[in-house]
Image: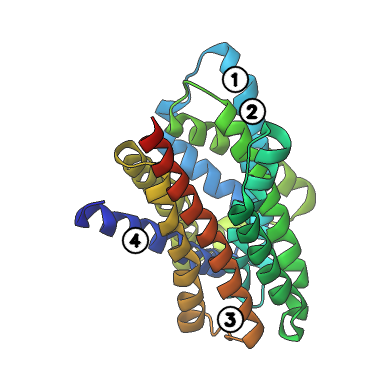
Amino acid sequence: MNFRHTLLAVFINLIWGSMFIAATIGLREFPPIFFTGVRFVLLFLCLIHFIKVPLPKIKPLITIGLLLGSGMYLALYLSIALAENTASIALFNKLEVPFAMILGVVLLKEKVDSIQITGILIAMSGAAVISFHPSALNDQPALFWMAICCAFAAVGMIKVRLLTDVHALTITAWISLVGSATLLLTSFVFEDHQATVLTNASWVGWAALIYTAVMSSFVANSGLFYLLQHYPVSQVAPYSLLSPVFAVVGGVLFLQDELTPGLINGGVLILAGVGLIHLRAMAMSRNNKVSN
């Protein structure tokens, strides 16, 4: 990867890491379900030209929208809203990698070797260290919802991999369409005073909401798709380990998060486990090219 593309990869993960900070700020003014629904409306407006697809593709796209829009993002923002320490859930978010690998084995009969299994076990042990450390007791509900988020993300990624001949931004457009419709309806059932929130929200709250929609989901995802057009996944994916690092640093600097021993040790284990999985994937990709 050349220097310019390396900077782009780092910038993408800076956006994703700072998304946790922006969302935490925005959720101080918006109810979490309503916040998620409105951000999807904004994202859909950015992607409306990508919504047209052949009729047979609509059903799987709705399924993906329910998993990644209604399910994953609802759990994500509930987790952020409940978290006292944003850094812990940002690190926990990387569990989507071993979750997806486990589901790939179960649902797609994919093969994993002993090194990948070791990476999964290391990452899971890191999650356990964070979850059961005394300093994280108040964050148990947030960690629970982040685990649910990772589960939805893993199932959604499996469904995306089974979908062929659909542009990546079209998938994102359908996620935003399904997510906005279902989450706004859910908000009006379980939350109150949405109109008051819209009129009384400060420019800071609106800026945070717009940032999570436009920068995180549109700009960063577009940059990711651009990189994937030029490089294999095995070269792009390891940079995702930077996003929780940026989130942790941002949480300490801007949200007064506390770096506890449990968070540090658990975070190192999660990133080490996920890093090992990525490194093994890179090695296997190189070996496959050589053998072919």
Residue type (three-letter) at the residue carrying disc 4: Val
Disc 3 on helix, strand or loop?
Answer: helix
Q: Which mark is residue 58?
A: 1
**Nearer-the-camera pick, 206 or 131:** 131
In this orientation, does residue 31 appear?
no
Q: In which quarter of the image is the C terminus?
A: top left
Q: Position of residue 178 (x, y in %)?
A: 62, 34
Residue type (three-letter) at the residue carrying disc 1: Ile
Q: Position of residue 134 (x, y in %)?
A: 76, 85
Disc 3 versus disc 2: distance between alpha carbons? Answer: 39 Å
Q: Mark 2 points at which residue?
A: 62
Q: Residue 160 carries which label?
A: none
Q: Mark 3 points at which residue?
A: 264
Q: Position of residue 267 (x, y in %)?
A: 58, 73
Residue under the point 51% across and 22% down: 164
Labels 1 & 4 near each other (Cβ < 8 A): no
Disc 1 versus disc 4: distance between alpha carbons? Answer: 34 Å
Residue type (three-letter) at the residue carrying disc 3: Ile
